[in-house]
Image: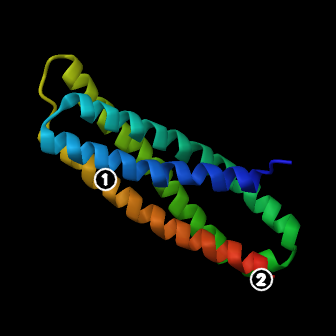
């Protein structure tokens, strides 16, 4: 049976791994000044956002499954669980905001305008920050997971 905790582990990797593909694609697009490659990078960013939505909304039921599996030991991990949730929420909102900025560049291009270099730089910098935050959230999630396994 495919459980929510497994769904969370699957979905949370989409924005992390996909984020690196998006970042690489967007950086190449900027270097080559190629709007087609930029749009591909924004598409990857949209996929990352969808993964972050799924990960965010499966989180609470994954915590419930953890509580059911290890019982009162989960109380000792409550601070780590809450911190992980706060970082997850921030990453979730961050990916949504990055997509809004990315879609704005896409729309500017569709209107025959040159997308703002500042806007593109904000997308790339924001994605770097989101990936760094994802690394920290992954570390916190790993601590929770390993503490639960050690029981």
Q: Position of residue 125 (x, y in %)?
A: 26, 54
Give coordinates of residue 131: x percent, y percent.
40, 59
Counting the numbered discs, the total is 2
What label does residue 126 carry, if any?
1
Whichever of callouts 1 and 2 sits on the residue coming sooner in the sequence is: 1
The chosen color scheme is: rainbow
Q: Characterize the local packing of mark 2: few (<14), some (14-19) or many (20 or more) Cα atoms within 10 angstroms.
A: few
Tell me where residue 34 sits by quadrant: top left
110 left or right, relative to 11: left
Instruction: Tell me the element at label 2.
Output: helix
Identify the residue at horizontal 27%, vertical 27% (top origin).
106
Q: Could you say where residue 117 lies in the image, as x and y percent from the top left?
A: 13, 41
Q: Residue at x 48, y 42 (%)?
A: 49
> Is residue 70 visible to us here?
yes
Q: Which residue is mark 2?
A: 150
Q: Is residue 96 above or below residue 76?
A: above
Q: Residue at x 31, y 36 (%)?
A: 102
Asked whether residue 75 appears in the rendered view, the answer is no
């Amino acid at each position: 049976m495919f459980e929510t905790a497994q769904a969370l582990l699957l979905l949370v990797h989409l924005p992390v791994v996909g984020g690196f593909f998006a970042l690489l694609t967007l950086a190449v697009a900027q270097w080559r000044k190629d709007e087609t490659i930029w749009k591909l990078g924004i598409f990857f960013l949209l996929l990352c956002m969808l993964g972050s939505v799924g990960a965010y909304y499966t989180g609470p039921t994954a915590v419930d499954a953890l509580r059911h599996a290890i019982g009162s030991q989960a109380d000792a991990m409550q601070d780590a669980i809450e911190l992980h949730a706060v970082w997850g929420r921030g990453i979730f909102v961050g990916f949504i905001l990055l997509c809004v900025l990315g879609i704005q560049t896409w729309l500017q291009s569709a209107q025959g305008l040159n997308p703002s270099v500042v806007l593109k730089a904000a997308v790339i910098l924001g994605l770097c920050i989101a990936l760094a935050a994802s690394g920290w959230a992954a570390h916190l999630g790993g601590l929770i997971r390993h503490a639960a396994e050690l029981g």
